[in-house]
Amino acid sequence: MKKTSDRVLALPLLLALLALLSGCEQLGIEDPAKVAAAKEAEGKAVGSACRHALRAIEDCYVLNPKAQKSAVFNGWKEMDEYMRENKIEGVAPVVPRTPVAKPKTDEEEEEASKPKAASR
């Protein structure tokens, strides 16, 4: 008799455990494989957009430092092949590239933080 009652109790506990585990995504726990696939897809999209906008691959890397370089390159290369096969002309970017600011040296930061004397 004891075996039957253990099975009766084990089944609901097992179902409850499965229900909790299936809701991990709803709790905000991310699957590493899905995160990696999303980063790969985003990098390919960035590379494709750069190629279509007539940007060099090096410029694309500089403008998108957080994107995976291999994914950006693959997207750029695929778009290049596609554009050549279909004789598609690129579109010049409308928004000008903003220059990347050099990090200030310690001396420049000290000069900027000093109060300036009032001129008369």
Image (cartoon, grey):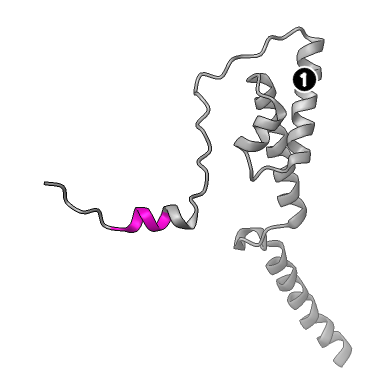
Residue drawn at (86%, 92%), measured in percent from left and top?
2
Q: Is residue 23 above or below residue 120?
A: below
Q: Residues within 10 Å of mark 1 (few under 14, many from 20)?
A: some
Q: Identify the image quadrant of residue 72.
A: top right
Residue 26 placement, left or right of 78: left
Q: Is residue 97 above or below residue 91?
A: below
Residue 89 located within the stretch drawn in magenta? no
Residue drawn at (80%, 80%), measured in percent from left and top?
10
Q: Position of residue 19 (x, y in %)?
A: 70, 66
Residue 112 located within the stretch drawn in magenta? yes
Residue 85 placement, left or right of 42: right
Q: Main secondary structure of the magenta part?
A: helix
Circle 1 residue = 80
**Mark 1 belongs to which amino acid?**
Asp
Q: Position of residue 99 (x, y in %)?
A: 51, 33
Q: Position of residue 89 (x, y in %)?
A: 68, 9
Residue 1 visible from this viewpoint = no
- Camera-side residue of 64 and 8: 64
Residue most toward the front?
120
Residue drawn at (52%, 44%), measured in percent from left and top?
102
Q: Which residues are magenta?
A: 109-114
Q: Identify the image quadrant of residue 17.
A: bottom right
Residue 89 visible from this viewpoint = yes
Q: Quadrant of the N terminus?
A: bottom right
Residue 51 placement, left or right of 92: right
Q: Position of residue 18 (x, y in %)?
A: 75, 68
Q: Secondary structure at mark 1?
A: helix
